[in-house]
Amino acid sequence: MATTTTNYGWDIPQSTDLVKDGATAIATLGQDIDTSFVGLKGGTTGQVLSKTSNTDLAFTWVAQDDSNAIQNAIVDAKGDLISATANDTPARLAVGTDGQVLTVDSTTATGLKWAAASSTPTFVGCQLYMSSNQSIANSTNTTLLWGAEYFDSNGFHSTTTNTGRITIPTGKAGYYLLTGAVRWSGNTSQRRNMSLSKNGTYIAGTDWMENPSTNEGYLIQTFAFMVNAAVADYYVINVSQGSGGALDVIADSSYFGAIYLGA
């Protein structure tokens, strides 16, 4: 007697069937198979099988460019791009002309456009200065504070919090040229020092320098130093002096700056 299979429910002849019963079972099996695979019948050259449901053996023949897939005909030329005009709505963005760059533009259908590359680079960096003189105690390493900004393109500095710092903002890790100048008030005693620190650690500085020989003179110390900076790294200028008493750093001509050179 035929036994039903567990996968497709076909009737399978058994080795113990009588000849007459076996022939009947074979005929039944053939009919079961023919019925199960009727969905594979037909189709034309170039078509492919596609599932019509989650049911076993539920297939149909469809064109190779399925209507639910991005069609070959959507692109017309070398360099064309596929974008979208809305949710689940692919669209062609025609290739631009030589030298153009791809630009985001929310006013266009695809949200993108080809445009001429800018010939003017965008400045990234800052230049800080003192809003007033800063008194530096004798033999005390002191961080200079910058109360004002000539410019600050990307929030490198705050005039209210940690005003001595230039901090690398999000998205702007890379190489920088740091520059600074410190102008000391006139005094003939001992020397002056200026140093650059990263995240609280010394990285560069000037040599100790004698002040001019008369009280009418001023000493100006400068530096230019390149760094490879990560996001959130911060830099400060520290100074010290050994005149025997407090000595001012003069706001006029003192500054601290950073210029982004590239990633």
Image: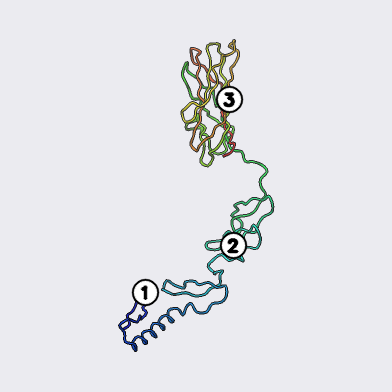
Q: Residue at x 52, y 79 (%)?
A: 42
Query: Mark 1 highlights which residue?
Result: 7
Q: Residue at x 55, y 13 (%)?
A: 187
Q: Are marks 2 and 1 in contact (CB under 8 Å)?
A: no
Callout 2: SS = strand
Q: Residue at x 60, y 14 (%)?
A: 217
Between 18 and 134, the one nearer to me in the picture: 18
Q: Which disc number belongs to residue 213?
A: none
Q: CA distance from mark 2 to mark 1?
A: 43 Å
Q: Which disc number belongs to residue 91?
A: 2
Which one is closest to the eye, mark 2 or mark 1?
1
Query: Mark 3 highlights which residue?
Result: 223
Q: Residue at x 64, y 41 (%)?
A: 121
Between 28 and 101, the one nearer to me in the picture: 28
Q: In the figure, is residue 99 to the left or right of 164?
A: right
The image quadrant of residue 45 is: bottom right
Bin the neighbour count of mark 1 within 10 Å (Cα to Cα): few under 14, some 14-19, many 20 and up: few
Tell me where residue 222 appears, x and y as whole percent: 58, 23
The image quadrant of residue 35 is: bottom left
Tell me where residue 228 appears, x and y as whole percent: 54, 34
* Disc on the earlier residue, 1 or 3: 1
